[in-house]
Amino acid sequence: MIRMSSSFIRTLRDDPADAEVASHKLLVRAGYIRRSAAGVYTWLPLGLKVLRKVEQIVREEQDRIGGQEVLFSALQPRAPYEATGRWEEYGANLFRLQDRRHDDYLLAPTHEEMFTLAVKDLYSSYKDLPAMLYQIQTKYRDEARPRGGLLRVREFVMKDAYSFDVSDEGLDRSYELQRAAYQRTFERLGLPTVICKADAGAMGGSRSEEFLHPTPIGEDTFVVSDGGYAANVEAVTTVAPEPLDADAMAALPPAREVTTPGTGTIAQLVDHLNAHEVREDGREWTAADTLKALIYMLHHPDGSTQPLLVMIPGDRQADEKRLEVALAPSIAVPFAEEDFEKHPALVKGFTGPVGLGEDTDSGVKVLIDPRAADGTRWVVGSRKVDTHSIDVVPGRDFTPDGYIEAAEVRDGDPAPDGSGPLRLTRGMEMGHIFQLGRKYAEALDLKVLDENGKQAVVTMGSYGIGVTRAVAAIAELTCDDKGLAWPRSVAPADIHVLATGKDAAVFEEAERIAGELEAQGLTVLYDDRPKVSPGVKFKDSELLGIPTTVVIGRGLAEGVLEIRDRASGEVTEVSPADVVERVLAEVRAG
Amino acid sequence: MIRMSSSFIRTLRDDPADAEVASHKLLVRAGYIRRSAAGVYTWLPLGLKVLRKVEQIVREEQDRIGGQEVLFSALQPRAPYEATGRWEEYGANLFRLQDRRHDDYLLAPTHEEMFTLAVKDLYSSYKDLPAMLYQIQTKYRDEARPRGGLLRVREFVMKDAYSFDVSDEGLDRSYELQRAAYQRTFERLGLPTVICKADAGAMGGSRSEEFLHPTPIGEDTFVVSDGGYAANVEAVTTVAPEPLDADAMAALPPAREVTTPGTGTIAQLVDHLNAHEVREDGREWTAADTLKALIYMLHHPDGSTQPLLVMIPGDRQADEKRLEVALAPSIAVPFAEEDFEKHPALVKGFTGPVGLGEDTDSGVKVLIDPRAADGTRWVVGSRKVDTHSIDVVPGRDFTPDGYIEAAEVRDGDPAPDGSGPLRLTRGMEMGHIFQLGRKYAEALDLKVLDENGKQAVVTMGSYGIGVTRAVAAIAELTCDDKGLAWPRSVAPADIHVLATGKDAAVFEEAERIAGELEAQGLTVLYDDRPKVSPGVKFKDSELLGIPTTVVIGRGLAEGVLEIRDRASGEVTEVSPADVVERVLAEVRAG
């Protein structure tokens, strides 16, 4: 029994100054957590109980699919992370340090390397596989902008699991096991999630899905269709029109240059065209008829650079994150004034693709939006000041070096699988499962003897759940303007017993009820504070958010107690003789 | 049920190359742990289960005395540790790092500061106290010489608890609660411990006791007497003779200088005296009649230095650790050749205390062994080459600046409490409880309103148990030449079921028994490996060290199974019908 009179619990009336989101405000005000540095938090008693309950649900679902729990150190030597390239790739997000001998160490953000080496150490045959290992462990990431209390922090608890298989089919099976385990886990946590196709990003690998929890405070944008498509915006592919063949393209009107003075922007260009160039079908010109030029210097991992021209429909903004993912591991930096001076083929405000491309002398790489398929007709810059070309046809008038997903995704865009129009939604990444494939096993030489006695490189999957973040997300989802409102599965106590007033009989009865509930196996938070007003106790009870509260107060003299449901606000009157049975029934109902 | 056929468990026949102690060898060979860097270990599945069981016992005993569990981050900002001076004091033992903004952080070795600040944050009145808070958390210490597997590591799990009281009496009560909790904890862990008076050292404070587990591989030396005295060697005080008064001293023979050529060592001096100086009572001279000079440059925390002469009985070695503790926070560095040149009052090989001391012009501080009480008679150097003085009497011929515990403690020395002769014993520190007093509360301004409405500085206690080390100590204590042999309280499984041979009936029966034992609430490690010989299974079973093994093998055809007790080696034959009941009885017997 947790007695509030002697517990390390204090509630605050005011929101912490640095808090933006509700879960952060309430977790601090209710005395669940405290900040100790930017993105670093202390777990106070009630908060720690929630954290452990979330961990235990995650653990049980990992155990259920045959996961075996291990525990790696947070402090790791540099060498294995050097071998896979992550020592560098992680950049400023990695906490690096040296020991007294000036050897390099890091605080691990994830443990792909160490799991790979552990399996290499213990296993040697295909008969040892498949294997599914996991840990629930403290991780470190030096986030540039910690935010939202527990939502984005620098020290956090994460479950990371890794699967090891000989064959691709085995990896698929392991992946499906985890996928199902994640669905059960988030269901038990009471966290709705959408499984989104994700870009595998820097981790490499093939199949990759994120479990996104839809919430307006989410940092990720994803898309869904009514037909069931869901994807991270970075992973959305554009539905392109069917390309025309060469004959059909030849039959289209030829490209023609027009003078377009002072049309450095798309809006100016469209206005000019509508004023001066009548279309054959009489339609107005729109931004969607144009391709706009985005000009970058592309920095390749080997240190070399190359001018890059990206053409996207003039009615769309560029999506920097989609562009970044599409170009990785190369990095695109927008052209500077002096870059234009060095590359006169690119004319600021009037650049188009014709005459450029890697197979021309220009040295400029040209990537275009998939909507600009062969045979489509566009207005583009002519690479001369105050000049554009109309009816430029990709595949006829120029050949791009490739297509790129760099344009923004919009509400109403068609889903790539034909399942209807897309809706843009905000979400928070709760889990991520992906097929690493053989990247880590190759880098660290993890091989086993296969059925034919030959060395085979092992294929791996990686599966993470942010445990700390899940606590915040559950708090955020379930809270209201009065406070936290935990689901039973993760509440720090099953029952909150309030003794109100000053009557000794009330406290005796509350003590009896709390004791009987504990004897029945429930955990009880008992507000036994002698000199605190009923109003404060009610407010604290709402703030603390235990699912069910039993109030023993003035009504006791008439044989009436109250059972209050935190989530619904429902109040039920009950007699002292019935209260334990009634509470047990509520808890069992879930 | 843990099935060995698919578990991440592999045993090794050979000891790891870097292992010195049995627990280290066996924990690695049995697949409980793996080294990931110097002093940094990975917990494999069986090891993690033991670690969690030890943690849980520690937790339950903390909860029993009203401890409230919290969890602080390992990553901590510099400021609070700066405020208490520990950022500097910890020296090279502290892992320090910077984040992306170049702010200083550390990986906390203990959390006095953070607990103090948390209480300051939540509490404000004497009514809130006493409070007992604890965490079971991963700590970091950059040990110069990690050793012994888990015995001395750089990342480890520790329980650290802190008590907060208004009064000294309250602190005494909190201290006694923890003392009793520690006794119960180590008893449940099966670890005999001796409670030793300890020097509070750099942590400050008054009462301080270590729970030392007597073991030949221990790094600490402590003393015990038959009468119940126990202390860390650093905390032992010397039994000094009663001092004589001035008249009695005046009546003693006067000091006299004698020429002692070539007697730079005590042995040479004693030989010379026995050859040339007959004593009044005819006894031989021994080293115990002399005081030997230890000469240091004392470095004070404020940066100043001072020559220091320490005189200890000539028959004893200096104990560097006792000396260090006695002089802290100043540090003594042995005199170098050039120091002698600068300080001619100190004559190498022939230095004595007469004419030195802080109230002389010499500037040399003189500290002597407590045995050299006023009125005792000694042979000492005369501060002239080849010359000593006989019958030099402290209190008459010179006045020391103080006494110092710098001489070694020996078997047979008297206990300071008169409880008999001391025995020197090797031990390993398993826990440490001490009264911090108000040092941290003052440094971090932790005050509460007292009963009179005045601000009172809180007094604190600090209580640590090395959880990781306890795992190693238990392994070390209980193992034998065949392998580990866990006590039931921390074993990774209750029962090891072995199916031996190739008979399908054997495996079916083993499966049934393992299933029934699990249904009874026991945890079972089941060796179901189909193609492993009985010999290997027996060897692995002994190495893994589960307390009770059930062997199902050839005897099954005749209705005979075996129950083996790992610790005693006892083998009991039993029928398949009785086996579950018999095993349950054994487990319940504990």
Image: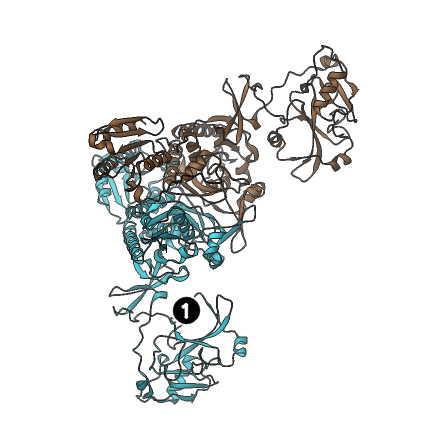
Chain colours: A brown, B cyan
Instruction: Please state the horizontal and vertical placement of residue B529, each as a whole percent of the image.
Output: 36, 36
Residue A313 image-quadrant placement: top right
Frontmost residue, B381 versus B332: B332
Residue B253 visible within the image: yes
The residue that appears at 29% across and 31% down in the rendered structure is B508
For residue A141, side relative to residue A535 (left or right)? right
Q: Quadrant of the C terminus of chain B?
A: top left
The residue that appears at 26% across and 48% down in the rendered structure is B569
Frontmost residue, A28 versus B524: A28
Instruction: Please state the horizontal and vertical placement of residue B444, each as a whole percent of the image.
Output: 43, 54
Instruction: Say if A91 sits above or below B320 in the image.
Output: above
Residue B42 image-quadrant placement: top left
Instruction: Please state the horizontal and vertical placement of residue A80, each as a whole percent of the image.
Output: 53, 44
Q: Quadrant of the N terminus of chain B?
A: top left
Q: Name the amino acid type tagged 1.
A: Leu
Instruction: Please state the horizontal and vertical placement of residue A31, each as a whole percent of the image.
Output: 39, 41
Instruction: Say if A148 sits above or below B116 in the image.
Output: above
Residue A131 visible within the image: no
Residue A200 image-quadrant placement: top right
Frontmost residue, A579 versus B382: A579
Question: Mark 1 sits on what residue?
Answer: B323
Frontmost residue, A281 versus A174: A281
Chain ID, mark 1: B
